[in-house]
Image (cartoon, grey):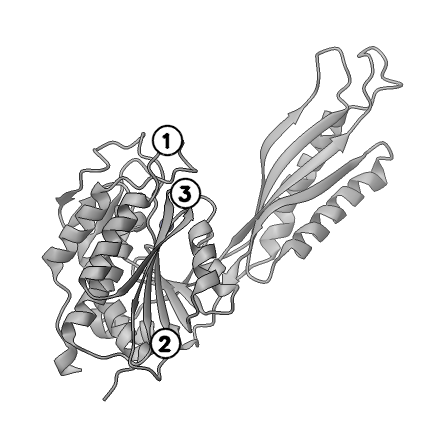
Amino acid sequence: MGKFQTSVDRSKTVELLKSLVRINSVNSTLVEGAPGEAEIAEYIASYMQGIGLETKLEEVKSGRPNVVGTLKGVGGGPTLLFNGHMDTVGIDYMEIDPLDPIVKNGKLYGRGANDMKGGLAAILAATKSLVDSGVEIKGDLIVAGVCDEEYGSIGTERLMEEVRADAAVIGEPTGLQILIAHKGFAWIDVETRGITAHGSRPEIGVDAIAKMGKVLVEIERLQEEVLPRKRHELVGSPSIHASTIQGGRELSTYPDQCKLQIERRLIPSEDAKVVNAEMETLLATISESDPKFDGGHQITFIRGPMEVSPDEEICKVLNRSALDITGKEPSFVGGSGWLDTEVIWKRRIPAVAFGPRGEGSHAAVEYVDLTSVIDVSEILKLTTIRFCGISA
Ligand SMILES: [Zn+2]
């Protein structure tokens, strides 16, 4: 691959990353009054245009754009999608100026440096370096900056209505490991119903809060005894926990209603059916031993888990490219959190996450390791050449 080895420009890539961090792109659904992605999308669009991509800015919602650039291939090869979210979580609680990136000991500090402007910069720099090298790829490379990953993922949802690809890489910070599986989650409302009565009339009143206590005991038992027996080799065991609880009217009245919100984390192969069956069994078990128990549940929101085989072409190509660039073979790993990869994966497109090394996503101090950003960029460039193919 001798003639293709123009390398990613480190100092220009660091400058690009700094510019991305300087633009406040706090998710405006997550944090009221925050600016959202409009400005950063404009910036990325002009970068893409500057390197000759067919570029499209598209509002998914008012002030919430996606930006999509396409490097057209000459034809006859598979299409690869690089995806990175442009939004960040809030900045109020950060210890150093979150929008004034500083570099210390090879690390760049600032909000979004790790999650995931580092990955975005790596993707953009890889694309630029590929264009600069003069290599003609066969398949298309689509580069997408998406909005709203930190809240509802409306950006990637919309993107996938419009683009088709044969594989996708999301540049989330994986420390140069290839993330091929992650957990999903379900939010569930549980309601118990009682009978209101004067506090002095236990023969009439049925205490909905006490009945919910039985649900809580069963949830803890699920978490401690049942769920640990299920295990996925990359993401571990599913889990369940109580999140919020409400109930009761006043001190001298039996409560007729109690509402509990719980979260269940799902491992690959689990879905809404599994969660519903589990909750139905749990409630039925309580009912059997307590005729006064009256309760029901409802899943209010669910995001599925995902899993891609390490034998997928994109996994093999990424793996080999990472080995060639860094001299180290990456591992295939699983993640505990939900990612946009699932939105792509559920459309039957193999999607993995692969990105730089850093710390402090959503935390008070956030940084990304700059050498890892450059390595990821080189790896993504080589991955594009190998996956999309090159014309002789
Ligand atoms: Zn992220």
Tag count in the figure? 3
**In the rendered view, does 288 fall on the left or right side of 153?**
right
| Earlier residue among tags 3 and 1 | 1
Q: Nearer the viewer, mark 3 or mark 1?
A: 3
Residue for point 18% across, 47% down = 19
Residue 278: x %, y % from top left? 70, 50
Tag in front: 2 or 3: 3
Disc 2 secondary structure class: helix
Instruction: Give SS at disc 3.
Output: loop
Mark drawn on residue 33:
1
- The structure residue drawn at horizontal position 28% and vertical position 32%, both measured from the top left corner, is 94
Q: Which residue is mark 3?
A: 62
Report how far apart the C-alphas of labels 1 and 2 lie in the structure: 43 Å
Distance from Cα at disc 2 to Cα at disc 3: 39 Å
Depth check, front residue: 210 or 268: 268
Q: Residue 211 lies in what quarter of the image? A: top right
**Dot 3 alpha-carbon crowd within 10 angstroms: few under 14, some 14 to 19, many 20 or more:** few
Residue 166 vertical placement versus 121 (above, below)? below
Residue 225 in view, yes or no: yes
Residue 250 location (% of width, % of height)? 70, 13
At which x and y percent is residue 156?
Answer: 43, 56
Asked if residue 372 can be seen in this view, the reply is no
Classify mark 1: helix, strand or loop. loop
Residue, disc 2: 316
Q: Is residue 100 above or below residue 130?
A: above
Closer to us: 13 or 369: 13
Ligand 1 closer than 8 Å to label 1 CB: no
- Spatial separation of the CA atoms under disc 3 and disc 1: 14 Å
Tell me, yes or no, whether the two marked residues, 3 and 1, touch with CB atoms within 8 Å: no
Foreground residue among 38 and 229: 38
Q: Position of residue 29 (x, y in %)?
A: 43, 38
Tell me the amino acid under the disc marked 3.
Ser
